[in-house]
Image: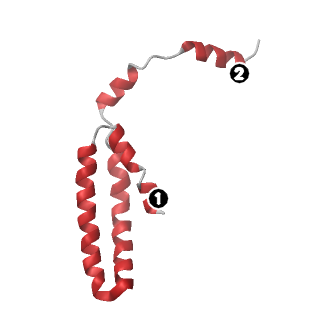
Amino acid sequence: MIQSIGTNVGWIYMSQGRTDTMFKWGVFSTIIVLISFAIGLRSGVEGVALAYTIATCLLAYPSFAIPFRLNRPESEALLSTVPVNHTCDAHARDYCHPH
């Protein structure tokens, strides 16, 4: 379940132009998972599964928290330059509040 949500986090990094941070986090988390596999191997298949589960749970919060802290002022300034279509607003107003 954690991985199905986590796979979408990469889009946040890309939309903020922070693939460098995404790469660093990927390297770090891969190292942690490999270490967990090495530790789990001592206990066989169940040990690997347990170690992987623990590593995934420990990495879950930072995996979600880091991308949401990437809110950069440049992206807000860029969004403020997007033109607003007032024609659509007028049609929506007429639809919602007919005269």
Q: Nearer the viewer, mark 1 or mark 2?
A: 1
Name the residue carrying label 2: 96
Lower sequence index among marks 1 and 2: 1
| Residue lying at the far bottom of the rendered structure | 43
Q: Element type at marker 1? A: helix
Q: Residue at x 65, y 19 (%)?
A: 92
Rendered location of residue 57, percent (x, y):
38, 67
Q: Residues within 10 Å of mark 2 (few under 14, many from 20)?
A: few
Amino acid, disc 1:
Ser
Q: Residue at x 34, y 66 (%)?
A: 58
Rendered location of residue 16, percent (x, y):
33, 37
As drawn, 21 above or below 52: above
Q: Residues within 10 Å of mark 1 (few under 14, many from 20)?
A: few
Rendered location of residue 88, percent (x, y):
60, 17
Rendered location of residue 15, percent (x, y):
36, 38
As drawn, 52 above or below 5: below
Q: Quadrant of the C terminus?
A: top right
| Residue lying at the far front of the rendered structure | 45
Q: Residue at x 22, y 53 (%)?
A: 24
Residue 99 as seen in the image, left or right of residue 88: right
Residue 81 as seen in the image, left or right of residue 19: right
Q: Determine which of the numbered discs, if any, sits on residue 4 in the image.
A: 1
